[in-house]
Structure formats: structure tokens, C-alpha cells
Amino acid sequence: MQLTGEIDPTLPLFVVAVEEEAEHLRALGLPLLVTGAGKVNAGVAVAATIGERRPSGVFNLGTAGALTVGLVGTHVVGSVIQHDLDDQSLMALTGRSFSPTLVLGDGLVLATGDVFVSDPVVRDELAKHAALVDMEGYGVAHAAGAFDVPVVLVKHVSDSSDGASLKTWADTIGECAEILAEWARANVLPHLSQSPRSSAG
């Protein structure tokens, strides 16, 4: 993980998974955390960064695959689930849920898992439960919620979660990073005195 800038309780923290997503955000001058890919990296990095000195909020800006046919653009996530943890079996064994849905507000459902979804069969199954898929959102939201720090997940569609996704992501990440930085410039910078909505996780 890599933190640029210092955590300030009056400022939000931008969180991205990889350097390719961070390029244009650094110019905005706010603290920026690059976590590394995957739920574990994301959760550990966020928890370690905000555990002692908390920002005013966390904005996770990143790319996501579309599970819904034709879905494009930038979306604020309404709720996030884990798609690769067998919570039903754990519930049957222990009577407890270890992967609750994290409700953040209004918006699309994001499914997070430690796999880059490029199989149309997997995509279609996930589409029954969510509109977007990524590899970090749940980890970020869960860690922020554990420290009572408000969190917003913002995802820009980079690919269609199909057989061409690996090439599509590589081809579009530069443009996606610019779009995410513009979203932050328009929706975060003018409202620094306002806190993002809280995670229910």
C-alpha cells in the first residue's frame, strides 16, 4: 500500500486499488491511498491507514465490470456484497452471517470478490444479485464501517465482465482514471465541509 499526503480529520481520503487509477487524483491535492488489488489488501490498507487518525470520510474511486448488459458510466454504489464467500454454509454451521450486505444509500448493487470476472457464465450468475462487480469495494466499505468513518464507493464501468475484459480494462483504464478524477473534482472538492454518507456495515 502507498499513502500520498497525510490523514487530516477535516479532509476525505481517496482510496484506489492500483496506480493506474491514481494518476489523475494526485493532482487534486487530497490524501490518496493505493491499497493493492483484492479485498484483503483493500481492507488491511484502509484499516491500517484510518485506525489511529481518521479522515472526514473515505471515497473509494475505481473501475468495475458491468454485470447488466449495456450498463456504462460512473455510478455511486448503493450497497455492496461479497460474491465469493459462502455465507449460506457458514450460517448453517454457526447460525451467524459473516458477510452481511453493506447498505450505503441509494444506488446500484456492487458485488466484490477476489477474482477478475471475465467468464460470461459467472457474469450472468452474478447479475442475478448485482449490477457491478469489482475486487475491493466490500473490503474498503467494511474497514471504513468498522471505524465509523463515512464511506462512498464510486465505480466507473471499464468492461463488460466477458471474455474481452482483460484487454478492455487495459485499453480503457487511462480514460477511466481521468473520468474518476473529474467526478471527484465535481462532487468532492466543492463540498469538503460536508461528510459522505455513513456505511451501515
Image (tube, rainbow, N blue to C red):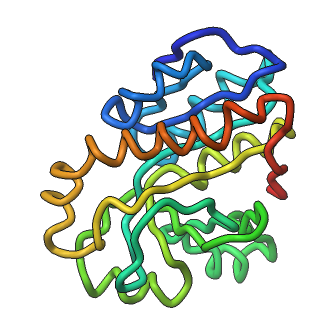
Looking at this rendering, what residue extends furthest in the top direction?
6
Residues 111 and 83: in front is 111
From the viewer's perspective, tell me whether residue 180 is left or right of residue 185. Answer: left
Residue at the (76%, 14%) spot, across then down:
8
Where is residue 63 shown, x and y percent of the image?
A: 40, 53
From the viewer's perspective, tell me whether residue 179 is left or right of residue 53. Answer: left
Residue at the (34%, 29%) spot, across then down:
19
**68 is higher (above) or lower (below) than 55:** below
Residue at the (36%, 27%) spot, across then down:
23
**139 is higher (above) or lower (below) than 35:** below
**63 is higher (above) or lower (below) than 82:** above
Where is residue 21 shown, x and y percent of the image?
A: 38, 37
Residues 34 and 186: in front is 186
Give the total number of marks visible in the rendering.
Answer: 0
Residue at the (18%, 58%) spot, across then down:
166
Residue 70: quarter of image: bottom left
Residues 162 and 69: in front is 69
Where is residue 193 shown, x and y percent of the image?
A: 85, 29
| Quarter occupied by the C terminus | bottom right
**30 is higher (above) or lower (below) than 183:** above
From the viewer's perspective, tell me whether residue 6 is left or right of residue 40. Answer: right
From the viewer's perspective, tell me whether residue 195 is left or right of residue 183. Answer: right
Residue 162: quarter of image: bottom left
